[in-house]
Each structure stands twice: as C-alpha cells, then as structure tokens.
Image (cartoon, rainbow, N blue to C red):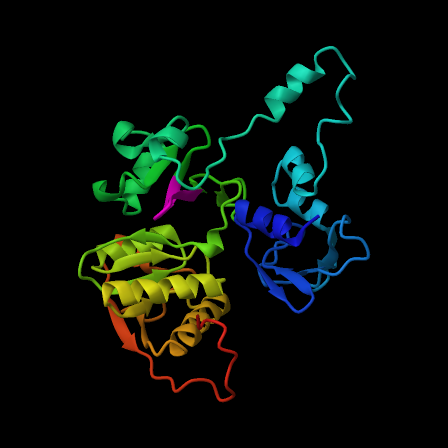
Amino acid sequence: MKQEDFTDALEEIGVAWQEIGQSIVIQSCPACGSQNWKVHLKVERPNEEEPFLGKCFAGQCQEGYSSFKYLLAAGMEWVDVMRVHGKDPTSSLRGLTPNVDELLEMVTESEPTLKLGDAIEESILANFFKISDWLDHPASIYAIKRGVPPEFYDRVLIDPETNAVVFVVQTDDGVAGYQRRFIDPVSPRLKTKTSSGFRSHQNLMHFPREGAKILVCEGPFTALAAWHFGYYGVCTFGSGVSGEQVKLISELSDRLLQPVGVAFDLDAAGQKGFAAIRSGMFWKNQEIFKVEVDAPDLPVGFDLNDAWQKGMKIREVATKWNGPAIPEIQSFLP
C-alpha cells in the first residue's frame, strides 16, 4: 500500500498523525486510550505491498499494530480498510450464496466522491441539509449553539443520518471536501470523519470577515468563535499544521493585507502547531500574535469557543521572536 493512502485514511477518520524520521507517528492508541503520540508505524518495508507495522510505546500497553489493524480499531469499516490497502473487499465473498451480490451492493454503497469544481447543490445537498431547512434537528440546534450564524449556512450543513454537523471546504476551484463533526460520537477519540480523498491538512476552512485580522484556530467551531470575536476565522483541522497550510495562511495575509494571529490549544500539540506557523511566517518576514482567553486557571481543553459561549473576554498577546538560534531550512519559501 502507499503511505499517502494510509495517511489520507487517518485524516478521513479524524486521527492526527505526523511523519517523524522513518515512522508514521499517530496521536491516539485505540487499545490503551493514550493521546500522547505513542503509536509508531515504520515507513520502510521489504515489500511496498505489505501493510505498515509497529506498536504503541505507551507505558505497559505495547499493543502491536499493522496499518490494517489500526484502521479497524480506530473505527473504519472493513471494506474501506481493504480498499485503502489495495484489496478487493468483495472478491472472496461473491458466489457464496445466491444473495451475496445483492448484500454486497448494500454494504459497499458509499457517499458520493467530491471532485474539484463540483457544485455544493449537486454533490452534497442530495445527502445533507442546510441548517435553515431543518432548524429543529439536533445537529442544527447543536451547530447554532456552537456559533454557526446564517451567514455560513452555505458552508456548514447537517447530516441527519449520522447526526453530524458537516463543514464544507471550498477553494477557488470548487469543493475540496468536507468533515463531519458527530454530535454523539461513539468515542471521544472519534469525533470527526473526513470525506474520502479530502486532504484536510492541505487546506484551510475560512469564515471571512471583511477588514478583520486573521485568526488561525485548530477546529471549525473555534474558528467560528474567532469570527464572533471580530476576526477572519481560519481552521487548520488540528494542530498538525503542514507547510502547505502555512503557505496558504501567508498568501491570505498578503491578499487581505492583514496580520495573522493564532489561537491554538495550550497543550503540547497546540504549542507545536503555533511554533510551525511562527517559524513559517518568520521566513516570510511576517510576525504573528497570540489570542488567549482573558481568565486565570482555565481547565484543560478550554478553548475559544467555550469562551464565546460563556461571554468571556479574550486578549491579544504580542510574540517577539528573532528567529531560530540555528537557521532552519527555508522550506516555506517559494
């Protein structure tokens, strides 16, 4: 299997990952519940058709994983895991009983695949609904509570079948993809699912506000809170910010002639994401600032959206940085 197919699959089911050295490092372990980036799968294999192999290094866990086993444990359907690994999920089942083919058609039926240039009305609304069309649905009520205003009913939809809010990402070429946010997830680690083929960490979601500073956030709801606080909200779909996303943020800043702020979580992953943006913007001679909730002793996980719902205040914090002590590779320069 291709490494890109596996990492795309991780993004589809909302699992954070990074490539470090010769390993794919994954944030969460389905076996022990660790969220501390302890699952390591080796990239190099004797045969490229083989799955990736590794284990969880958290404490006493030491759970062994293949890429196949991990995706199944993380909640991906068996037929989808087979396809990710280049296998035909139906070949071994056809012909076993007179009704197998009919059953397989039901099992393998999937949502429409989005392509750049597809119109939202044609490719998505056949399965999803605008919030304004079903205001009393639990997903609509949840979305509005979390800050989705009528201005963005064209890019934030609902999926009544899975009880999810759907964030649609659009580019100049059309629809790039979407991410579901489940209202009642089966596991706290599986809150989101990304559409097939959508590389969330190569795109940004925008909540525009004319003449406003740009504020970059980890999640869509946090970016919506940024919009309510008076910023141009931008979502990176997690703290694992890619070089392509830094480039897109810089280009947005140049186009709007606005400075860039960051409002990531205060945990280690959020600090690492902030550092990636700060470093990338440094090489483009652009300074950034932080936005924090103006309150002491906040609980773990408290974010900008929580602050907006509670009517709390935020503050901008200037970040003075003279660059790395040892010059970094200028990977973000054109």
Give how far across and how far down residue 37 sits, in percent. 60, 63
The residue positioned farthest toward the left in the image shown:
211
Residue at figure coordinates x 26%, y 43% from the top left: 152
**Magenta span:** 166-178
For the stretch drawn in magenta, what is the main secondary structure? strand
Residue at figure coordinates x 48%, y 56% from the top left: 201
Residue at figure coordinates x 35%, y 51% from the top left: 221
User: Does the stretch in magenta take in 170?
Assistant: yes
Give how far across and how far down residue 297 sits, in percent. 36, 70
Quarter occupied by residue 74: top right
Give how far across and how far down residue 28 sits, in percent. 60, 55
Camera-side residue of 123 and 187: 123
| Residue 61 in view in this figure | no
Give how far across and how far down residue 143 sits, in percent. 32, 41
Q: Is residue 157 above or below residue 257?
A: above
| Residue 47 in view in this figure | yes
Horizontal placement of 145 versus 236: left or right?
left
User: Does the stretch in magenta take in 160?
Assistant: no
Quarter occupied by residue 24: bottom right
The residue positioned farthest toward the front in the image shown:
334
The residue positioned farthest toward the bottom in the image shown:
325
Q: Is residue 123 above or below residue 55?
A: above
Quarter occupied by residue 212: bottom left
